[in-house]
């Protein structure tokens, strides 16, 4: 009887988890649909969009820059063993550039962006929800989705795209400098190898992924911020759930986009 009860309890927990996941995914999809309706024609607050572009993008430049520089250096350190073994200095630009542009750069920048911007957005919206500021906007006949949510989502997608471009440039610079310092590969040799082997599609693949990651972070952070319950402790739980959901969505999306984009 005890084993049967344990199996029943496990089945109930599994079913409950699946239903909870389906409810959250459905909530995110409904939010996406409501936002899309406000894009045709566009109905959003311009000053709020400009403020969020600066707050989410410009203020993220330092942390993204540091992440990108060290990411480029790590790529060279990892490739250094094979470069020394086979004397293939001319391939250093390809090895570091290919991995950085297509995979490592967009993912790491998206995760840093999620931790800084996505979590902060969830906390702000969650606080506004539990203090009934969102309800107050509706009382004043102000659409919260047009005034608050849509500008934030657009800002996150646009700025993550731009930050990925910025991060790619710094990551390549970090790779070139580290290659010269550790392996004696000149900067000119590094970029000659990079330009000869890297295709435009390699860069485009990473940028397409960054747009997808931005959509995931924007929708997840806004959804969990707007559905907070339980006061201040609920805000903390929402932030944690938002970051976990964004990270999971990023890796799942990376798998399928890598398979489809080639």
Image (cartoon, rainbow, N blue to C red):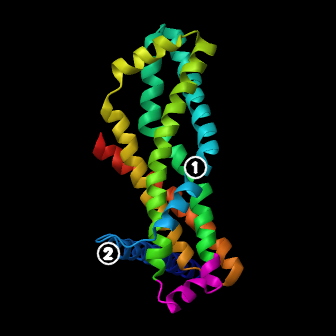
Work out whether residue 242 or residue 164 is closer to the camera in this orientation and state it.
164
Q: Identify the residue at image location x=48%, y=35%.
A: 168
Horizontal side of residue 10 vs 33, given as left or right: right
- Taking the magenta stretch, the answer to whether it contains residue 73 is no
Q: Identify the residue at image location x=50%, y=45%.
A: 163
- Secondary structure of the residue carrying tag 2 is helix
Res. 229 in view: no
Q: Quadrant of residue 230?
A: bottom right
Q: Where is residue 116 in the image (x, y as percent from the top left)?
A: 62, 55
> Disc 1 to disc 2, how far (Cα)?
29 Å
Horizontal side of residue 89 vs 234, given as left or right: left
Q: Identify the residue at image location x=28%, y=71%.
A: 40
Q: Position of residue 26 (x, y in %)?
A: 39, 76
Quadrant placement of the N terminus: bottom right
Horizontal side of residue 36 vs 177, given as left or right: left
**Where is mark 1, residue-wise?**
58
Res. 135 in view: yes
In the image, residue 131 sits, relative to residue 120, either above or below, namely: below
Count of numbered tags:
2
Question: Magenta part of the protein: which range?
Answer: 127-142
| Mark found first going from the N terminus, 1 or 2 | 2
Mark 1 vs mark 2: in front: 1
Q: Identify the residue at image location x=48%, y=12%.
A: 188
Quadrant placement of the C terminus: top left
- Secondary structure of the residue carrying tag 1 is helix
Work out whether residue 246 or residue 225 is closer to the camera in this orientation and state it.
225
Question: Which disc is residue 37 wearing?
Answer: 2
């Amino acid at each position: 009887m005890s084993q049967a009860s344990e199996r029943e309890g496990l089945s109930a927990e599994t079913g409950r988890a699946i239903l909870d996941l389906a409810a959250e995914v459905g909530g995110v999809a409904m939010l996406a649909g409501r936002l899309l309706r406000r894009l045709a024609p566009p109905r959003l607050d311009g000053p709020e969009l400009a403020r969020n572009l600066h707050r989410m993008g410009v203020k993220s430049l330092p942390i993204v820059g540091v992440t990108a520089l060290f990411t480029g250096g790590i790529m060279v350190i990892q490739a250094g063993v094979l470069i020394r073994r086979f004397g293939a200095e001319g391939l250093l630009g390809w090895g570091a550039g290919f991995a950085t542009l297509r995979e490592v750069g967009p993912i790491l920048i998206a995760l840093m962006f999620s931790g800084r911007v996505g979590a902060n957005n969830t906390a702000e919206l969650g606080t506004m929800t539990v203090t009934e500021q969102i309800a107050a906007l509706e009382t004043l006949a102000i659409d919260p989705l047009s005034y608050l949510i849509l500008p934030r989502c657009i800002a996150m997608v646009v700025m993550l795209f731009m930050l990925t471009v910025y991060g790619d440039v710094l990551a390549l610079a970090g790779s070139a400098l580290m290659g010269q310092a550790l392996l004696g590969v000149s900067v000119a040799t590094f970029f000659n190898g990079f330009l000869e082997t890297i295709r435009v599609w390699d860069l485009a693949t990473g940028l397409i992924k960054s747009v997808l990651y931005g959509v995931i972070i924007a929708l997840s952070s806004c959804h969990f911020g707007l559905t907070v319950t339980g006061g201040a402790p609920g805000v903390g739980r929402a932030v944690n759930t938002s970051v976990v959901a964004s990270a999971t969505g990023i890796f799942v999306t990376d798998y399928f986009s890598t398979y489809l984009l080639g």
